[in-house]
Image (spheres, grey):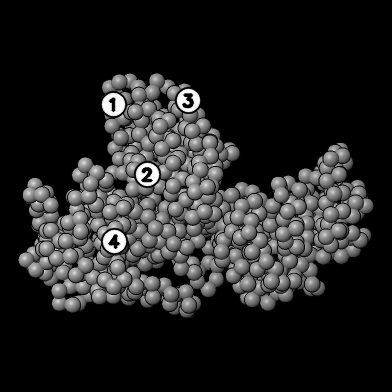
Amino acid sequence: MSEDSDVLYRLLVQRVEDYAIYMLKPDGIIANWNAGAQRAKGYTPEEVVGKHFSCFYTEEDRKSGWPQHGLETARETGRYESEGWRQRKDGSLFWAHIIIEALREAGEIIGFAKITRDVTERRETEQALLQAKELAESNSEQLASLSQFLNTVIANIPSSVIVENAVSREILLVNRQAERLLGISREKMLGKRPQDCMGIGLSTFINKQSDECLRAEGVHRSEQQLKTAIGDRTLQTTSSVIRGHDPQTSYVMMIADDVTDQQAAHARIHHMAHHDNLTSLPNRILFSQRLSEALQRDSYTHSHTATLCLDLDNFKNVNDALGHQIGDELLRAISKRLRMTLRDDDTLARIGGDEFAVVLPGLKDISAAHQISKRLIESVRPPVIIDGHSLSVGLSIGIALADSAENTPDQLLRCADMALYEAKRNGRNRYEDFRIEMDAAARKRRVVEMDLRDAITCNQLRLYYQPITDARHDEVMGYEALMRWHHPENGLIMPVDFIPIAEETGLIHSLGSFALHEACREATTWKGNQTVAVNLSPIQFKNSGLVSVVESALEASGLDPSRLEVEITESVLLDNTLGNISTLRKLKSLGVRIALDDFGTGYSSLSYLRSFPFDKIKIDRSFINDMQDSREALAIIRAITGMSRSLDIQTTAEGVETDEQFRRLKEEGCTLFQGYFFGRPQPSESRLIGFSPL
C-alpha cells in the first residue's frame, strides 16, 4: 500500500465503529486496521497489522482453504461476498458478513479492501423465524393462532415483520420495528389492508412483495429504496408463504432488514451504488435521476422525453432450462446489444430480472421513439451463442411520452409499464404506446382483483355442473365442474371475466384448490358413480404443489380417485414437457383420470399422446360447430375418433347443441357427449335440470 492510499483509508474509515474495514496487501497480509475492526475482533492494530488475515478464520476453515478461496475469487472476479463463522481474539465465534473488493491500479492488483460486519443477531433472528415457520406448517392448530405465537418470537427483533392473510390481505401481525419504520401504530394497521391504513408508496411496496411471493408460490426476495417515517431507507425484504390446513388459511410473512447504513459504508469503498452488478448498466436509482434530469431539460428546450419499459420474451424458459449462469451470460449479451442500438444521450437501465428501462431525451415526437423501439426489437432477434447453446429471445416494449411539465419519473415509468403489459397481451415481440384507457383498464383489473379476494373469503364462488352422457343418451356418465362468481352487486360473473386476472395475480392457486376440494366434496353426495371433471389452469398445473392439493381434496372428501377427472389443455404441455409429463404421471399414480381438453387446437398433439396415456380426449367445440359446413372440420373429427379407437382412448364431443350434431357425431364414433343439447351447467343440488334421457 502507498502512503497516499493509507491516508485516504484513514480519512474514509478510521471513524467507522460498526464495521471492520481494513486493507490487505496482494498476498493477504493486513495493512490497516480501523476502530470497527478492533471492536468486532478484539485485536489492536499493533497485534494484527503485518499478519495474514486467515488468523480470523477457525482452524477447520483454514484447513479447508476458505481464506485463500475468498482472496482468489476477489482477484479473479473483482469481488467476493459470503457469510460464516469467524473468530475473535478471545476465541469466541461470531457470524460475519464479509466483502472482499479487489483494488486495481493500471490493471494490476494493488491490494484488497475487506469489510466485515457482525450479523450474529440477525442470523439468530432468521433461525428463530424459520423455526416458527416450520412449527406453523406442521401444526395446524397453532397456525390458527398465528398472531399469538409469532408475536412472542418477533416482538423485539431488529427486523421489521408484517404478516398478512394471503387472500384478504388484511394485516394480522406487526412488530415494534415495523411500527417505527412505517410511522404507524400497530392498532391502526391490524385488520386492515395496506392501502387502507398507509400512504400509496408504502402500500404499493408491501402489496408488490406479497404479489410476487404468491405468484412464485414460495419465497420472494427483493431490495429497494423506500421513503419511510425515518427517511429514505434501503430495505432487503424476504416474503414467505405460510400454508394452513385449508385453502383459505394461508399467510404471507414479510421480513424487512434496513441495510441503509451497511450500504453507505460499502459505498465509501467503491462507486458502483448506481449500477447493476451483473450488466454494469445504470440501475433503477440512476435511471430515475437521468429521467428527472431529462424532464427538467424538456422545459427549456421544448423537446420531449420518452420512457421505455423493456421485457425479454422467453427468458424465463432459458433460465429454467439451462440455469442462472447461462441466463446471466444471456442478459449481459443482450444488454450490450441494446446499449449499442441507442444514442449516446440515451440511458439504458436494468431494473430487475429480465426487465430494462430506457430514457430517450430530446425527441421531436413519438415517431422517433417508435423508430428506436423497432431497432431495439431487431437487435435482440438474432440468436446468442453461449457455451454451445443457440439462444433466442424476443423483446416487448411499452412507450410513454412526457406530454406536460407535471409528468414525474414514477408516473412515466408506471405508464410505460402499462403499455408493456399491453404489448405482451397482444402477442409479445412488439411495442405499444401508452393510452389513457390503459390506466382505466389497469384500475378495473385492480378492482376485480380486490373483489375476487373478497369473493374467496366471503363464499361468493360456486361450482355449476354440466352433464356428460354416452351415445345412448339414457344415462349421465359424469359432470364437468364450472366455476361461477355470484357478485353481490354485479350479479353472475363468468370465468372468462375473472380467471385471467386470477392467473396474473396468483389467486388462481386459491381458486383451483377451492374447485378441486368443492368438486370432490359435492361428488360424494351424488347417487351412483358419476365422474366429476375439474379444469386445471396452465399456471395451476405448473405449480409444484398441485399433486399435494389433489391428494388433499381426495383425502378430505373420501372420493374414489377414479371418479375424479382433471382436464388440461394442450397449451399446458408446450413448455417444460418432461416436467409436465412427470406431474401427469404422479396424478395418474393417484388413480385420477386425465383428459386432454380442446384437442386439435395445439401444436404437438400426437407427440403428447405417445408420451402419456390420456384417459380421454375432448374434441374442441369449434370443430363441432363447423362440421356441417366444413369438410376440413369433419375430417379432423374423423381423424381424432379413429386415432382414439386405435389407442383405446375415450372421446368427448364438446358443445353439442342440436340433435343433428348428436346423430352425426355418434356415426363418426364419438363415445361421450356434452353441451346445451343435454343440459346447461347447474348447481349441484339441481344438476339434473335440463337432462332428458331419450
Label 4 is placed on what type of residue? Gly
Q: Which residue is mark 1?
A: 297
Instruction: Say what secondary structure mark 3 lies in.
Output: helix
Identify the element where label 1 is drawn.
helix
In this rendering, the label closer to the viewer, 1 or 3: 3
Residue under numbered circle 4 = 70
Could you tell me residue 683's position as x and y percent?
Answer: 71, 62
- Residue 395 in picture, x, y percent from top left: 51, 38
Q: Residue at x 45, y 28 (%)?
A: 372
Q: Is residue 1 left or right of residue 413?
A: left
How many badges with numbers are in the image? Answer: 4
Q: Earlier in the sequence, mark 2 or mark 1?
A: 2
> Would you identify the image quadrant in which residue 155 lies?
bottom left
Q: Which label belongs to residue 371?
A: 3
Residue type for callout 1: Arg
- Mark 3 and 4 residues: CB-CB less than 8 Å, in contact? no
